[in-house]
Amino acid sequence: MEYKFKYYTDNNGLSSNTIQCLYQDEKGYIWVGTADGLDRFNSYDFTNYRSDHRRTYTLENNCVYSLCAEGFPNGDRISVGTSDGVYIFDSKDESFVNLPILSDGEVRHNLLVYSLAADVARQQWIETLGDGLYRYNIKSGTFEHCTTRGIPWAFVGHHRQGVARP
């Protein structure tokens, strides 16, 4: 059996040749988090999403480290982990909204979100660099800053994206 590979670079439409993460949504799009933006690939070409300070509802930071869509009810939204927190991308209107991470009633700023995952209870797990792990309940919109007790087995010692199952 012979396999064929297609090589994509910034010359083909990628935002950057530095790829941080990949995600395929239920519609078949491939989402690529790069060091210079978020790209959606439809099997033919790329759509780039980058910070644009002339517009509202865009990324504030182009360095995308993690992606996760599990847990959202209709599959139209994706969590985007950047070097400046989490943004929720809504594919219906192609907008980004910052998700303020709360801990003890205060918004946490400048969090590098290294990894995102969701569990079967529709909760997203947000792993940060230097500030630990947060659990975000999508339905209630609440956060919990987690300690090592009660963390699902999938996170202990791992940095993986996907669905955590207890």
Image (cartoon, rainbow, N blue to C red):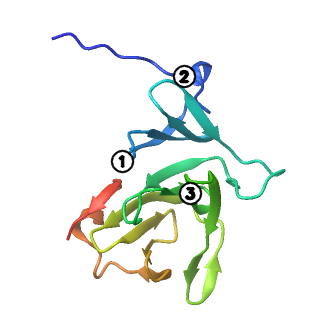
- Residue density around tag 3, few if under 14, some if 14–19, many if 20 or more, within 10 Å: some
> Image quadrant for the C terminus?
bottom left
Q: Choose the circle earlier in sequence order: 3 or 1.
A: 1
Q: Please tell me whether mark 1 sits on a helix, a strand or a loop.
A: loop
Q: For mark 2, what is the residue?
A: 9
Q: Please tell me whether mark 2 sits on a helix, a strand or a loop.
A: loop
Q: Nearer the viewer, residue 83 or 72?
A: 72
Residue contact at pointers 3 and 1, CB within 8 angstroms: no
Q: Please tell me whether mark 3 sits on a helix, a strand or a loop.
A: strand
Say if 49 sits above or below 74 in the image. above
* Nearest to viewer (mark 2 / mark 3): 3
Q: CA distance from mark 2 to mark 3?
A: 26 Å
- Residue density around tag 1, few if under 14, some if 14–19, many if 20 or more, within 10 Å: few
Name the amino acid type tagged 1.
Glu
Q: Choose the circle earlier in sequence order: 2 or 3.
A: 2
Q: Position of residue 13 (x, y in %)?
A: 60, 25
Residue contact at pointers 2 and 1, CB within 8 angstroms: no
On residue 41, which mark appears?
Answer: none
